[in-house]
Amino acid sequence: MKQKIQISPSMMCADPFALREVLDTFEKGGIEWLHIDVMDGRYVPNFTLGPDYCRSLAAATSIPLDIHLMVEEPDRHVELFAKFPGARVSFHPETVRQPVRLIERIRELGASPGIALDPAMSVQACSHLLPLVDQVVIMTVNPGYAGQKLLPFCLEKITECRAFLKSCGRHADVQVDGNVSWENIPRMVAAGANILVAGTSSLFVKGRVAASELARMRELGA
């Protein structure tokens, strides 16, 4: 059975001076997640959102946080992020020595665990971890910046990941992150993605989001 398409807007693309307006639009539009890119300047050459931002966001809305840790040694920081109600925390398995232990720790803290695969990481290399998580993030651009072009070979990874989960009897979410544009969304959904990380390629225009664009994305993912 086809999974319902969910939307997880990338909050690094939101205008901080229009955040209340953006959140109101998301709440009225039934947005399922708020995607938080946490970057430390080490795993990726950029710095972005942190625990204080997550704390403020969690206090401002009931939409759960979809936290993507693009950091080295995520096991040192996970307790700062896993405490938010209904949060999902995804990390890159190559950044930690004991990824299974970290998955278990995220669950112990009350959050939902996920792993993220950058373009260089194959599905096969992480196949032993896929049955243990609630979400697999397939990155279709190199991590670090918004506005990059799609790496087409990553679409095949979505299909491969979905097929592997099905063979295991698992219904984990497959999230696609990177150039989720109006043109690419149908291909991503057809490949097996059921959560779309929406940024400047689709939803956000100058940091704001129109309700009509949310409806358009729902239609494309139907």
Image (tube, rainbow, N blue to C red):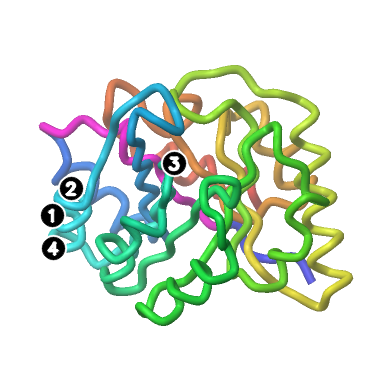
Q: CA distance from mark 2 to mark 4?
A: 10 Å
Q: Are marks 3 and 4 in contact (CB under 8 Å)?
A: no
**Label 4: few (<14), some (14–19) or many (≥20) C-alpha neighbours in 10 Å:** few
Residue type at numbered disc 3: Met
Q: Are marks 4 and 1 in contact (CB under 8 Å)?
A: yes
Q: Are marks 2 and 1 in contact (CB under 8 Å)?
A: yes
Which element carries disc 2, helix, strand or loop? helix
Residue type at numbered disc 1: Ser
Q: CA distance from mark 2 to mark 1?
A: 5 Å
- The answer to whether 168 appears left or right of 6 in the picture is right
| Mark earlier in primary sequence (2, 4) | 2
Query: What residue sits right under mark 3 in the picture?
Result: 70
| Mark earlier in primary sequence (3, 4) | 4
What is the number of the mark on residue 56? Answer: 1
Give the residue drawn at x 53%, y 69%: 103
What is the number of the mark on residue 59? Answer: 4
